[in-house]
Amino acid sequence: MYRKQVRRRRAVLVALIVASLVLLSISFSEAESGPLGTLQRGVSAALSPIEEGASRALKPARDLVNWFDETFDARGENEAMREELAELRTELADAQQALGENEEFRKLLELEDSQAELAAFTRVTGRVIARSPTVWYSTVSVDVGTSEGVEVNDTVINGDGLVGRVSKTTRGSAQVTLITDHRSAVSARLLPDGPEGVVEPEVGDPEDLLLDFIANDEDVEEGQILVTAGWSNGRISSAYPYGIEIGRVVEANAGEQESFQQVHVDPFADMRDLDLVQVLTGGPERPGVPK
């Protein structure tokens, strides 16, 4: 019984295959206007409304699936773009920082080459790590200290000019009192052969420097450069060596009730944007300047 069923199924399968081959042969050999072509067109026309209706019915589902696919793809692309943008920002920040540091180092090297008067000093380069919270006590802390040979009253400069002097030290750091601090006073002279005076911050505006004790009959012109005087009488000395640039004269007015001029000076070093500085250590002894 079982064998008869198997033979019957095989016979049906062979018959179907033969019928398929015959129909394919007729389809390829027959013209489009033949009976088989007419039958195909009739079936297609009958099923076309059903196919169109099914397509419309399934369109929202297809759109939903496509929306999810596109959304997930977009989210993946956005995440990848955000990560790439973050990496680019980091690289840009590193490049800008390196560029700024290179510029600061270049200025320091140029300053070292141009000031032969400072050749006797050992230069210790440090970075500003802290700033005073108020403008009246204008101090910064740097990451070099006594372990690098830094001592109290050592002069501090940067690539633009005079910054201040060391007022406190630890083994690994030092506090620098800036020339804009109200306690600061720097003996200075005008170039090329101008008079000498004392540079102090303007009362009420610590970022504006005043050159005091310049007589009214002295010629002072806008744009003249001011440098440290570096004077000494053998018993007492200036806290700063000679020739360090301080700033430029921006205004000079004769005093109305005093015998001295009001000379305003714009410092070369930007005290609000200090980063790399150099401490001048060692050097010749300065009488009267404690260590």
Image (cartoon, grey):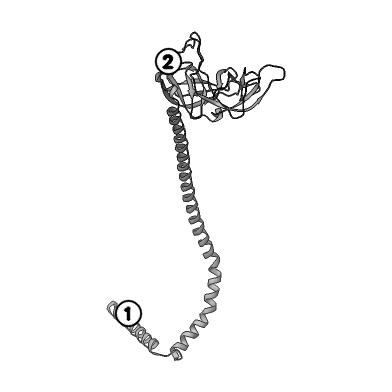
Residue occupying image coordinates x 37% and y 85%: 24
Q: Residues within 10 Å of mark 1 (few under 14, many from 20)?
A: few
Quarter of the image where the N terminus is located: bottom left
The kind of secondary structure element at disc 2 is: loop
> Where 282 sits versus 24, above or below?
above
Q: Amino acid at mark 1?
A: Arg
Q: Nearer the viewer, residue 128 or 188?
A: 188
Residue occupying image coordinates x 48% and y 85%: 41
> Where 19 sits versus 186, above or below?
below
| Residue 266 position within the rendered picture, expressed as x and y whole percent measured from the top left | 59, 28
Q: Which residue is mark 1?
A: 9
Residue at the farthest top position: 235
| Residue 262 position within the rendered picture, expressed as x and y whole percent measured from the top left | 66, 22
Residue 285 sits in quarter: top left
Residue 145 sits in quarter: top left
| Residue 260 position within the rendered picture, expressed as x and y whole percent measured from the top left | 66, 18
The kind of secondary structure element at disc 1 is: helix
Q: Which of the two labelled residues, at mark 2 and mark 1, occupies the earlier sequence position?
A: 1
> Where 164 sits versus 28, above or below?
above
Q: Which residue is mark 2?
A: 284
Closer to the camera: disc 2 or disc 1? 2
**Real-space Cα distance between discs 2 and 1?**
116 Å
| Residue 174 position within the rendered picture, expressed as x and y whole percent measured from the top left | 47, 20
Q: Residues within 10 Å of mark 2 (few under 14, many from 20)?
A: few
Residue 144 numbered tag: none
Q: Nearer the viewer, residue 130 or 119?
A: 119
Q: How many marks?
A: 2
Q: Nearer the viewer, residue 92 or 51?
A: 92
Residue at the farthest right position: 257
Tags 2 and 1 in contact by the CB under 8 Å rule? Answer: no
Q: Amino acid at mark 2?
A: Pro
